[in-house]
Image (tube, grey):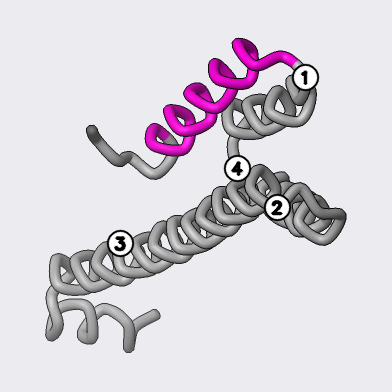
Amino acid sequence: MAQLIPLLTAFGLGSIVTALVQSWLAQRSKQDERAFREKQAAYVGLLEAYHRAAVEGTDEAAKAFAYWQMRCELVAPASVRDAIRRIVETNDDRAARMKADHDLKEAMRADLRITK
């Protein structure tokens, strides 16, 4: 303890606190960036698979959509997951599908903090 006091005095307690706060903020920024990239990749993949399933209508396209749906289940908030669920459930109801499609895009924009 006696050796710690001169060390704190030499470097200054303020400098040490500043360094700790800067380190924490940098780590937090890295985590936020990683989460954004993961969500972005999952959302783009889902939208591409959604388009492909709508255009092709093949079993392979449906499986690709299911894969990206599962990826979104891991990283998306409840609003996005709910909109994806409604996309799947409204396969035969055009009006409800359009509403679910709109809600999906709005939820994704909100989650990624993208403004119109």
Q: Is residue 102 magenta?
A: yes
Bounds of the magenta segment? 93-110
User: Residue 15: percent from the left, percent from the top?
Assistant: 14, 72
The answer to whether the residues at label 3 and label 2 have Cβ atoms under 8 Å apart is no
Of residue 21 and residue 116, the one placed in the foreground of this image is 116
Labels 3, 1: front one: 1
Numbered circle sitting on residue 56: 2
Labels 3, 2: front one: 2
Give the residue at mark 3: 25
Numbered circle sitting on residue 76: 4
Calculate the distance from the C-alpha at mark 2 to the C-alpha at mark 4: 26 Å
Calculate the distance from the C-alpha at mark 1 to the C-alpha at mark 2: 17 Å
Of residue 54 and residue 78, the one placed in the foreground of this image is 54
Considering only vertical position in the picture, is 104 above or below 46? Answer: above
Labels 4, 1: front one: 1
The answer to whether the residues at label 3 and label 1 have Cβ atoms under 8 Å apart is no
Calculate the distance from the C-alpha at mark 3 to the C-alpha at mark 1: 48 Å
Give the residue at mark 1: 92
